[in-house]
Every structure is written in C-alpha cells, then in structure tokens.
C-alpha cells in the first residue's frame, strides 16, 4: 500500500534527479562562460563560443565528465539513502544529507579527473558544476515535496481506508495516519466486533459496524482498502470479511498483532510455495551484501599486494628480535557463533597467554576484555606495530577467506563470549570486521558496554555508505594512532 506508493514516487525522484544532474552540465557551461566574461578570466579549453554548437564541441571533448559526473552524483544519492523517508524526514535534515553527499560526489568526481588524467580540465568549471548541481537538486526537492503536499491537502490522489479494530495497536495506527496527512490517506470509519462500540467516536472516527457488516459498508461507501489491525485471536473472524472485499475488488491489508518485538523487523517471503513471515534484526538486500563482499575481496587483495614489502620486513624483524612464530593465531568467534582462526603479527612474547593470568589484576578494561596500557608482554617491535596498527595487516587474509569483513564488529574471544550478557550476543549477528565504530571512537578509551552498544548501533544502521565513512575514518585513526595501545 503506502510502501508501493512511496517506492513509485522514489523512482520518480530518482529519474528527475538524473535528468537534472545531466542538465546541470550545459547550465554550468554557460554560467562558467559568463563568469569568465565578467571577470576577464582566461578562456577554458575546448570552449569555442557561448552557443549551443560551442557546448556540443565542449561536451564531445569532455564526454567522460559529461557522463561520469551525473552518474557519480546519482549513485551516491542512492547509496546515501537520499530517497528514503523523503516525506517524513525534516527538510533541514534532507538538505544537509544532500549537502554532505554533494561534497563526497565532488571529491569522487575530482578523483575521476585525476585517475583518468583528463587533459586541461577546468577547475572553475568543476566548481561551477558542483554548485549548479547541488542548487538545482535542492530547488527540485523543495518544489516536488511542496507540490505533493498541496495535492494531498486539496484531497486529490487520496486513498480511503476502512480500519478494522479499535484496540491499542489500532488506535496507534490511526494516530500515525492522522499525524501524516501528506501521505494521502483518509480514514472513512472504523469497525469493531463489540456491539457497544457501534456509533461511538474513537480517535475522532465513528465506528460504522461489526465485521459481519463490512460487505455492506464497502458497497455503500467509497472504500479503497480495508485494513485489519486486529489481535491474532481474530484470525478466524476476518476470513469471511476478506472474501467479501475480494468479491467487490476492494484491497485488504492485515496488520496482525502477533508479537511485540522491539528490534526485529518482519518480512514476508516465499519458500518454494510456502509463505513465510520472517523476523530479522539485521536485513540487507542481496545486491548490497554482494557489493560488500566484492569490496572486501578487492580492498583486502590490494592491501596485501601493496603492503607486501612491509609485511615481509615486519616478518623479518619479528623473527630477528624475539623467539617464537611470526604470526599470532587465535580462535575467535564469528558470524552467529562460528569459530575461526584469527591471524595477526605476533607483538608479544611467545608465552604471552600463559602470563595473562598473572597480570589479570592490572586489567584496565571493564567487562570480559583484557587490556593493559603498558603491557610487559609486548616486545619492542611489537609496541611499534601495535601503535601503528601494522599488526592487523594479516587479518586481510581472514577477509579473503570470508571469516571477516573490512568493516564489522571486532571478533571476540571464546572466553569473552561466554561472559556476554544476552543483549550483547546480538553483535554476533553480523560478520566481524577489522574496523568498526569502536576503532574510530577511542578504542581503549571507552567502556566495554559503550563498545557493545556501538557495535549494535552499526548493525541497526548498516549501509554501504556507513562502511565507506568508517573506512575513511579508520585511515585517519591509523595515521594519528588515536586510541591505540
């Protein structure tokens, strides 16, 4: 119902945005020419005149920019969820999200020019295009949202609803519809199976009858959809009403009060002909998971190849400066409790695990995690590679194997998981990673409970754009050594 309408309008917004982003190119061309004329600036390359033919010649020589700029902006708009919740999101928040995305898009477009070595690319034109594209998108969003709100306020394109149910959840549903009049939904009345409610007003709407009266009501009133917001005990009562609606072609929707879940989201699927109602605490589309895994493979491969000289050097230094293996191997807990072997450069003495019990009184972290600021088990070369996070490089092998991801909650020890509280185990519902919110927020400077909540925040708000932001923030943390011990 509403989701289908929202999806349709989102697709319209996407199409309009793509058209505007391509239109921004010729507009930027003429604005750039005007600025140069007014300021006596030098002429840009391939700009023969301020005419349509001049624009065509300029575009033909910069076809990569003409195609690349709009597609990059458009793709980042989609990745940054600009089109989601556009009707319920405050316009200030939407404008800010577009502004941040525009900055990222400008950065990526600039990288495109550098990477493909576009000759004589004008920096002024690049800035003018970015400003023009952003301004046009903001104007378009303001106009479209205003038009949609006005259309629904005038009563056009409305969907008339008959609500079945007057319980607590039904009243919450009604208040939700009332508080979002711009959705274009209009409630014509309510249905309740208790005769004492007949004719009474609930949440400002009149109870028109009982369930057995629905067939009569939909034939007398203009009803586009009947929505059943009822407890599961009513399932046997509503079948005949649904069949009556089916006969006259009125759509029906059921919001069953099955379980009062706080985190998990319901999703209807089909298993070879068997309808299933699934509850997920983490859900992503298959293409998103595929792209996340694809990026994991590409990035980890690049890192292992690029840093292979450093990896070889560190391996030699570890071998020469202390006894024991080059790599430290440890059993960690991965996705939904799967065990795997984690690889790191050995930064401690060979018998570090045996000495851990003697140092337990000096643990500086709360919860089941063990950390000491000046750990006596750390070797001289180990201190350097821990401070610079070089000891983490072998974990890209774990990423290639599929045990880990680049971004995700840090993989815990078996002993740590055994001491988890129930709510903390939910962090295992996503594949562990090399970096996450905790790594870029101070690491050992925050409490264990804050760490757990940061991981759950990542799971609840996961997106590809969030992964990219965390990767970039991780690069800064690694360079500065913030929070590392």
Image (cartoon, rainbow, N blue to C red):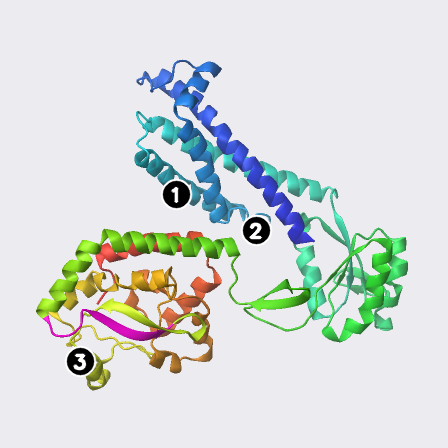
* First reached walking from the N terminus: tag 2 or tag 1: 2
Q: Position of residue 373 (x, y in %)?
A: 20, 72
The image quarter in which residue 147 lies: top right
In the picture of the structure, the residue carrying the numbered disc 3 is 351
* First reached walking from the N terminus: tag 2 or tag 3: 2
Q: Is residue 329 magenta?
A: yes
Q: Position of residue 295 (x, y in %)?
A: 39, 53
Badge 3 density bin: few <14, some 14–19, many ≥20, Cα 10 Å: few
Q: Position of residue 254 (x, y in %)?
A: 73, 63
Badge 2 density bin: few <14, some 14–19, many ≥20, Cα 10 Å: few
Horizontally, residue 288 falls left or right of residue 300, namely right
Name, please, the residue furthest toward the left: 320
SS state under label 3: loop
When the figure is inspected, residue 267 is found, relative to residue 7, above or below; the finding is below
At horizontal 34% and vertical 27% (from top left) the residue drawn is 124
SS state under label 2: loop
Numbered disc in front, either 2 or 3:
3
Answer yes or no: is residue 436 visible: no
When the figure is inspected, residue 408 is found, relative to residue 90, above or below; the finding is below
In the picture of the structure, the residue carrying the numbered disc 1 is 104
What is the magenta range?
A: 322-333
**Foreground residue, 378 or 262?**
378
């Amino acid at each position: 119902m509403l989701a289908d309408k929202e999806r349709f309008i989102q697709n319209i917004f996407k199409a309009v945005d793509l058209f505007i982003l391509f239109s921004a190119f010729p507009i930027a061309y003429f604005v750039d020419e005007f600025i140069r004329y007014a300021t006596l600036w030098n002429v840009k390359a391939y700009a023969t005149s301020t005419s349509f033919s001049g624009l065509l010649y300029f575009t033909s020589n910069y076809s990569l920019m003409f195609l690349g700029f709009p597609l990059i902006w458009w793709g980042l708009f989609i990745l940054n969820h600009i089109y989601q919740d556009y009707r319920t999101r405050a316009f200030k928040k939407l404008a800010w999200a577009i502004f941040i995305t525009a900055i990222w898009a400008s950065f990526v477009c600039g990288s495109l020019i550098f990477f493909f070595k576009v000759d004589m690319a004008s920096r002024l034109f690049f800035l003018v295009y970015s400003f023009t594209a952003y301004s046009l998108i903001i104007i378009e969003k303001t106009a479209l949202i205003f038009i949609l709100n006005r259309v629904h306020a005038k009563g056009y394109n409305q969907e008339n609803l008959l609500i079945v149910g007057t319980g607590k959840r039904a009243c919450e549903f009604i208040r939700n519809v009332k508080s979002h009049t711009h959705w274009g939904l209009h409630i014509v009345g309510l249905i309740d199976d208790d005769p004492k409610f007949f004719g009474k007003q609930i949440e400002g709407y009149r109870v028109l009858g009982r369930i057995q009266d629905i067939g009569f009501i939909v034939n007398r009133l203009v009803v586009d959809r009947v929505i059943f917001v009822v407890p599961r005990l009513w399932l046997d009562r509503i079948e005949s009403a649904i069949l009556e609606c089916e006969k006259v072609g009125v759509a029906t929707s059921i919001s069953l009060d099955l379980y009062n879940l706080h985190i998990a989201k319901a999703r209807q699927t089909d298993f070879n002909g068997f309808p299933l109602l699934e509850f997920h605490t983490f859900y992503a589309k298959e293409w998103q998971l595929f792209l996340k895994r694809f990026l994991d493979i590409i990035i980890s491969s690049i890192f292992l190849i690029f840093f292979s000289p450093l990896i070889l050097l560190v391996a030699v230094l570890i071998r020469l400066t202390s006894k024991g293996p080059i790599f430290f191997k440890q059993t960690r807990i991965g996705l939904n409790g799967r065990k795997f072997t984690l690889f790191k450069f050995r930064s401690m003495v060979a018998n570090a695990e045996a000495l851990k019990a003697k140092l337990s009184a000096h643990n500086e972290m709360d919860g089941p995690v063990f950390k000491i600021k000046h750990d006596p088990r750390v070797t001289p070369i180990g201190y350097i590679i821990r401070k610079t996070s070089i000891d983490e490089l072998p974990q890209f092998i774990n990423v290639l194997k599929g045990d880990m991801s680049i971004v995700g909650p840090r993989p815990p020890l078996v002993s740590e998981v055994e001491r988890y509280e129930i709510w903390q185990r939910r962090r295992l519902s996503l594949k562990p990673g090399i970096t996450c919110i905790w790594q870029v927020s101070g690491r050992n400077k925050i409490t264990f409970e804050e760490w757990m909540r940061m991981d759950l925040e990542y799971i609840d708000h996961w997106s590809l754009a969030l992964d990219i932001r965390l990767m970039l923030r991780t690069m800064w943390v690694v360079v500065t050594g913030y929070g590392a011990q």
